[in-house]
Image (cartoon, rainbow, N blue to C red):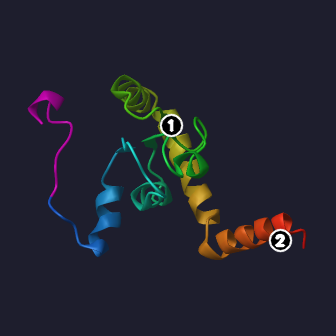
Amino acid sequence: LEELGGQARVLPHLPPEEVSGWLLSLDALALPSLSEGCPNLLMEGMACGLPCVATRVGAVPELMTDGVSGLVVPWGDSDALGLALGRLREQPDLARMLGANARRGMRAFSSAGECRRWQDLYAEILGA
């Protein structure tokens, strides 16, 4: 990681009880995935109020609204990822706003609410 000027580090495996403390030690979270389902790490980072940058894969666009609760970039576009991370570093007010909105969004998220939304969708499809 020398090419990153010491701005990144690789950590060993963390036990689940240490993840939130680690997340709270970060300035931002980047999730440059090429493929995802519903990324738990992104939801955990958002719940901690971190400004997040993630690629437009899987459920990321449903979890984060670009420019509102995070920055969403095309997958495989390292230039866009770098520019988005640079924006967070250069615009701390933007980073704080994105983190606060992400936290609010995750506080409103619940498995019970998701279940209700699925039930509503099935009812609508079945005409019930």
Dot 1 amino acid type: Val
Sequence-wise, the earlier of marks 1 and 2 is 1
The Cα–Cα distance between marks 1 and 2, rounded to whole angstroms, is 32 Å
* Picture quadrant of residue 97: top right
Q: For the point 65% across and 64% down, which residue is it? A: 108
Q: Residues within 10 Å of mark 1 (few under 14, many from 20)?
A: many
Reply above or below: 81 against 23: above
For the record, the magenta segment spans 1-11
Q: Percent position (x, y) of residue 124?
A: 85, 65
Q: Percent position (x, y) of residue 8?
A: 20, 40
Check residue 123 in the rendering and tell me which mark sits there, or answer none.
2
Q: Percent position (x, y) of residue 48?
A: 45, 59
* Relative side of 16 to 36, left or right: left
Q: For the point 9% across and 32% down, which residue is it? A: 2
Reply above or below: 66 against 17: above
Please say whether residue 60 is one of the residues in the magenta stretch: no
Q: For the point 24% across and 72% down, which residue is it? A: 15
Identify which residue, 77 or 85, lies in the foreground: 77
Identify which residue, 43 or 93, lies in the foreground: 43
Check residue 72 in the rendering and tell me which mark sits there, or answer none.
1
* Relative side of 95 to 76, left or right: right
Please say whether residue 2 is one of the residues in the magenta stretch: yes
Quadrant where the image shows the N terminus? top left
Dot 2 amino acid type: Ala
